[in-house]
Amino acid sequence: MTFKEMCCLKGINRCMMEKVIRITPSARPFGGDISLPQGIPDQKWRKMSSQLTPEEVTSAAERIVRAYSAMDEDVYFSSFDPQATFLFHATAERLTSREDYRVQWRIWVSEGWKVIGCHSSDPFIQIYGTTAVFSHSVATTTEERGQRAVTEERETIVFTRAGSGGIMAVHEHLSLNTF
């Protein structure tokens, strides 16, 4: 099925279809090919579209990593939608809201856990209109009861355009990097 046929099935008219930006499957966050509709200058296109940009996603992900690394609870949790979900290898259950995660965070902190540093590498961004998938590798140094540990993980964060024009994380999945 072609892109045009899918749009027709979903009730997307030609005008809306022409406003879609596609990022090629091989695109990387910095320097990936972005195809804009012909005849629309890039700056004007950005004003017309609610399409997320790689720059916005990168900025939002960096904000999360910085706040996590600094243990800035307010900034960190404000980056997530209240209904965001979280899957972590260190928790037995899915956390089904930002508040559930915040409660778990506070339990960890009360038990002596703290983040010493967090380093993100190998970012990859996939844009799907007003939604984006950000994945990267993460090396996190933590301390618990005086013992430091470095954990190598892979993380995926799903972002979406928020009502005010900013973007919010709506899902986070963290797994151990066993490779």
Image: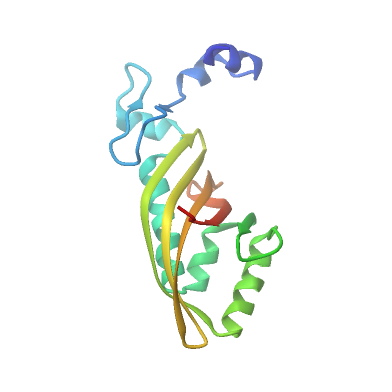
Give the residue at the far bottom of this rendering.
146
**Which residue is found at the position 38% from the left and 41% from the top?**
54
Q: What colour scheme has been applied to the protein in the rendered image? A: rainbow
Q: Nearer the viewer, residue 129 or 166?
A: 129
Q: Nearer the viewer, residue 134 or 155?
A: 155
Q: Nearer the viewer, residue 116 or 71?
A: 116
Locate residue 57, reporting x and y percent: 42, 47
Residue 111 appears in the rendering? yes
Give the residue at the far front of this rendering.
179
Q: Nearer the viewer, residue 72 or 38?
A: 72
**Which residue is found at the position 40% from the left and 43% from the top?**
124
When asked about the image quadrant of residue 48, the answer is top left
Question: From the viewer's perspective, is residue 54 above or below residue 11?
Answer: below
Question: From the viewer's perspective, is residue 81 above or below residue 28?
Answer: below
Locate residue 16, reporting x and y percent: 52, 21
Locate residue 3, reporting x and y percent: 53, 16
